[in-house]
Amino acid sequence: MTDITFREPLVDDADSIWNLIKNNKPLDENSKYLYILLCHEFSNTCVLAESTSKIVGFASTFVSPKNPDTLFVWQVAVDKNYRNKGIAQDLVSQSLRRVGPSIRYVHATVTPSNTASLKFLQNFAKELNAPLSTCSLFTKSVLGKDHEQEDLVRIGPIPKQVKEVIA
């Protein structure tokens, strides 16, 4: 496998990130402006994966303003030619390293049909040796008839020894 490097995203990376997301169904497509904002305002928690100067992965994550002990994982995308190599897990682990040991939980939302993301989160919870639970968060009545419900996936509490290793 080609060497993968991880770094903070820059505003100049937003176009490539936007294209990566558009090519990663079933992730929701958002405006390019949103990815510009993520690279500008959340660069300290978002993580980009590169191989020979090509963006091959991106994790948009942030510390929850409502729950400062929680890292919210919004989207994780890996180029189809780089999947199944642990890059998605590395992206989220890199984000956890950046936010430090004050994080006790990882949250994400997943549609019921997105079995790949749910499997990823289940495997990540096992790697952290942390419990995983799910509950309904946003129903179709909130999201609209054209969008599946979004379930909240909660991982944690993350054991102290794991946090020390990640930090």
Image: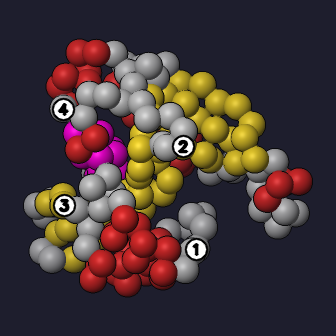
Q: Earlier in the sequence, mark 4 or mark 3?
A: 3
Main SS, magenta residues: helix
Image position, residue 6 (x, y; %): 18, 58
Q: Which residue is mark 2?
A: 108
Q: CA distance from mark 2 to mark 4?
A: 21 Å
Q: Which residue is mark 4?
A: 167
- The secondary element bearing badge 1 is classed as loop
Labelled disc at residue 29: 1
Q: CA distance from mark 4 to mark 1?
A: 32 Å
Q: Earlier in the sequence, mark 2 or mark 1?
A: 1
Instruction: Name the amino acid type tagged 1.
Output: Glu
The answer to whether any part of residue 93 appears in the image is no
Instruction: Name the amino acid type tagged 4.
Output: Ala
User: Which image quadrant is residue 137 in?
Assistant: top right
Q: CA distance from mark 3 to mark 2?
A: 21 Å
User: Which image quadrant is residue 158 in?
Assistant: top left
